[in-house]
Image (spheres, helix red, strand yellow):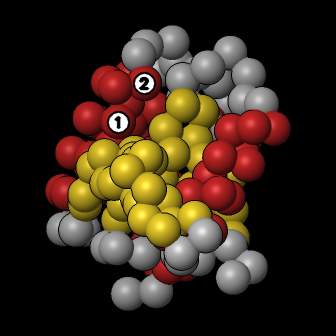
Amino acid sequence: MSENEISYLIRGAIVKVYCNLGPGIFESAYEAALIHELRNLNLQVSTQVPVPLIYDSVRMEVCFRLDILVENLVIIEVKSVEHLLEVHHKQLLTYLKLSGLKLGILVNFNSDDISKSIFRKVNGL
């Protein structure tokens, strides 16, 4: 399955979660519900996936964690904030760079219109 096919399924799962839960609850609740929906689609889902930091050829013990990794190909960064900031977009791009993956999805569930709160980010590698 390609990143684009996975992305399509993720978007549908996000909309389903949003329609069932609505805006304004904790990020952890959206994350748990989204994981459930993705697994119901028979997708391989990993959560809180550690990403090592390699700096100057040295593996640092500092660790970043991806919210959700789908099929070992697509990162989902889940937010529930008043407004997404530029740093949220940059955070996902950094995770893509550090992990070597191509596609990420940033979603802010605290929105009046979920369709305007889902952002695809591509790592130019």
- Depicted 65 relative to depicted 51: above or below: above
Asked if residue 110 lies left or right of residue 66, the reply is right
Residue found at x 65% / y 57%: 94
Contact, mark 1 vs mark 2 (Cβ under 8 Å): yes
Frontmost residue, 85 versus 10: 85
- Which SS class for mark 2? helix
Frontmost residue, 36 versus 68: 68
Asked if residue 83 lies left or right of residue 64, the reply is right
- Depicted 64 relative to depicted 111: above or below: below
Residue found at x 54% / y 23%: 80
- Give how far apart the Cα atoms at labels 1 and 2 are: 6 Å
- Identify residue type, mark 1: Glu
Residue that sits furthest to the bottom in the current view? 1
- The residue to which callout 2 is attached is 27
Frontmost residue, 108 versus 69: 69
Label 2 environment density (alpha carbons within 10 Å; few <14, some 14–19, many ≥20): some
- The residue to which callout 1 is attached is 31
Residue found at x 49% / y 38%: 78
Specify whether residue 12 is in view. Answer: no
- Depicted 23 relative to depicted 63: above or below: above
Residue 85, horizontal then vertical, whole percent: 77, 30
Asked if residue 3 lies left or right of residue 125, the reply is left
Q: Quadrant of residue 72?
A: bottom left
- Which SS class for mark 1? helix
Specify whether residue 40 is in view. Answer: yes
Which quarter of the image is occupied by the C terminus?
bottom right
